[in-house]
Image: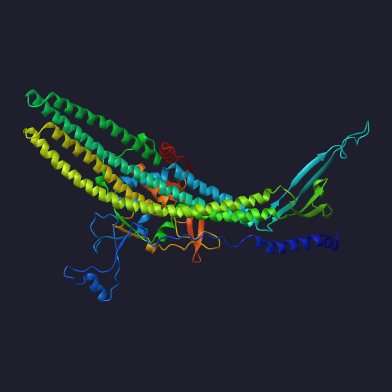
Amino acid sequence: MTAKTFSRQIGPLARLTCAVLATSVAGCALKRDNYDVPPVPLPETFLNQGLNQGPTAGSDGTAGATDAAAAAGTADKASPVNPDPTTPPVTAETPQTPLAEVLPQWWRLFGSSELDVLIDRALRRNHDLQMSTLRVEQAQARFKQAAADELPTLTAPVSAAVDAPPNGLGSVSKGGDVVSERSFRLGLRTDWRVDLWGERAAAADAARQALWQATYDRDNVRRLVVGQVVTAYFQYLSLNDRYRVAQETETSQTDMLGSVEQRYTEGEATGIEMQQQRAAVRSSRATLPTLDLQRAETRHRLAVLVGMTPSELTLSDSGLDSVTVPGVVPGVPSSLLLRRPDVRSAESALLLADANIDEARARILPSLDLSAGAGTGANRISELFQPYSLMWNGLASLTATIFDYGKRQRQIDYARARHQELVESYVRAIYQAVRDVEDALAGVHFNALRLKAQTEALEASKAAWDFSRESYRVGATDYQTMLDTERTFRSDQDSFHRDRLDRVQSTVSLFLSLGGGTGDDLPLPGSGKRPPLPDTKQSGVVLASAPAAQETKAINWTEDASPRGWSVTLAAVFDRAGVDAAWRDLKAQLGNAADGLTAYPQQLGQVVGEKDGTLKDRMTWFRLRVSGLTTEDAAKTLCGQLGKDGRACTVSEE
């Protein structure tokens, strides 16, 4: 075949291909460039939040120091007001830390080292958190798969065949010999579905939004897991307090029973009084197993949250006195709530559904498939690469659906209805976030007032019980009065510890409702109208000093760093903060055996976003590799020790 003949034969196909490409560029207009998020109005401040506005007048009617500063040209800033009305007013000496600075590790503000250890364990071992991280990896694989669908595929078919008889059945006459014929072929083939209407591009956009949604879902799981650990831990501390009160009650009533029995022997007490006191003793003893059961169940729940069996978890007998409750003053609602991972997840789902509409619309229109192949074929291998053995073909196929009983149109209807549903879900998520913060602020306010009143009631009932007990011993009051005052005092004691737990849990709920330190201010990928990016400078303050930085030594973050010698690789997957927590937990677990070991995070995947023209990390996940082991036996011993916790690991040598 001459070059002129070849050109004449492929000319129509080339012209058709060029026309198709030109049409595809223009036809992509069917897919929209922008996907919008509806605006949702948010209040400028929270309902249960206030500020001290303006200057404070002195007792003599003159302007205070604030006026003097203003007169001197100093900016007069409003002082934040602690939602807890029982605390002293905020002054210039009150420590204040930007909320955005401490929110990622908000639990450390309570000042409990035992709680810090439990959180590190949960971030390393919690199964729900691990599963949500692996779902991000799955979503990234789906996104890459969807992006690859936009490109042509290239295959290399190779075949060797033998046919006997070569002309098929019945081609050999009676008495004739059956002969065989061999053939060999090899070549290249490319296939491409031209994305005329933007179907593949819309599918890739949807997969990208699904990936971002998976990252926010993972952050939300982290927020909830941390909140559950903190809540369960404080419940356990409160139960310790209540158990001690029950023990004190049982001891006190047992002592009083001895006094009543002695008075009964001396004829100064009646049999009814003695039996009443015995009933009180037995009633207080019956309370102890109930509290023991509640403590055991709380400890078991906490063990599961931190990825351990109940027998492995050891807790102290401390009470709520061992923690410090910080004051939290939220800032502008939009700077906080639009960062919450559940809100960002709802936003991603909304954009995903919008892209699905374009994908469904494009499926109604004709599809164009292009394929081309070239290769060589011969009956002998030695002739495969001869010029006369070359062959090629090309095919353009345009397929349109004439009638499908409205199936594809119903897909569009479904996609639009789904999008409208997710619009409502997005608005609900934001309003629910506002409600969560308002509930938490109201809880801090009213639980503080209730705790203050309960403290005063406890002090009064304690004084009344002390007076009645001494009066009864000298015969100045009757037994029933003494018994009633004691019951009131013990009831107030138990109520005090319950109210104190509610007050602490209100602050925990406030941290969680403000996002729990997860989420970010990166815009979601794509173009369109989006909520304004939150300003973290307006997120509020914490009325406490920032905790000291935790030790993260012996972690080699150097890119492409490679460990030397024997190492152990954990099968679990962590984000960047999870690597730090996992390493601290490992060091706490190994003790002195961790000396000399170095952690090497190995990056498995990354999701990046763009803000102000700069690429920023949305989420990066790693596997943790522990190196510094000199022998294979030492590496296997370490891996076996980690395996006792149900954590898979592998041993390797570099």
Position above or below: 648 against 32: above
Task: Answer with left or right where residue 607 lies relative to residue 170.
Answer: left
Colouring of the image: rainbow
Placement of the N terminus among the 4 image quadrants: bottom right
Judge by depth and name the residue closer to the eye, 322 or 51: 51
Q: Residue, x 78% and y 63% (percent of image)? A: 15
User: Which residue ends up furthest to the right in the rendered image?
Assistant: 174
Residue 499: quadrant of the picture? top left
Judge by depth and name the residue closer to the eye, 65 or 42: 42
Q: Position of residue 555 (x, y in %)?
A: 40, 52
Q: Residue, x 17% and y 45% (percent of image)? A: 459
Task: Answer with left or right where residue 249 lies relative to residue 304.
Answer: left
Residue 615 can be seen in this image: yes
Judge by depth and name the residue closer to the eye, 270 or 159: 270
Q: Position of residue 512 (x, y in %)?
A: 38, 51
Q: Position of residue 410 (x, y in %)?
A: 65, 49
Q: Position of residue 466 (x, y in %)?
A: 12, 39
User: Which residue ends up furthest to the bottom in the rendered image?
Assistant: 72
Task: Answer with left or right where residue 419 lies relative to residue 187.
Answer: left
Position above or below: 256 against 621: above
Judge by depth and name the residue closer to the eye, 439 or 231: 439
Give the tally of numbered discs: 0
Residue 605 can be seen in this image: no
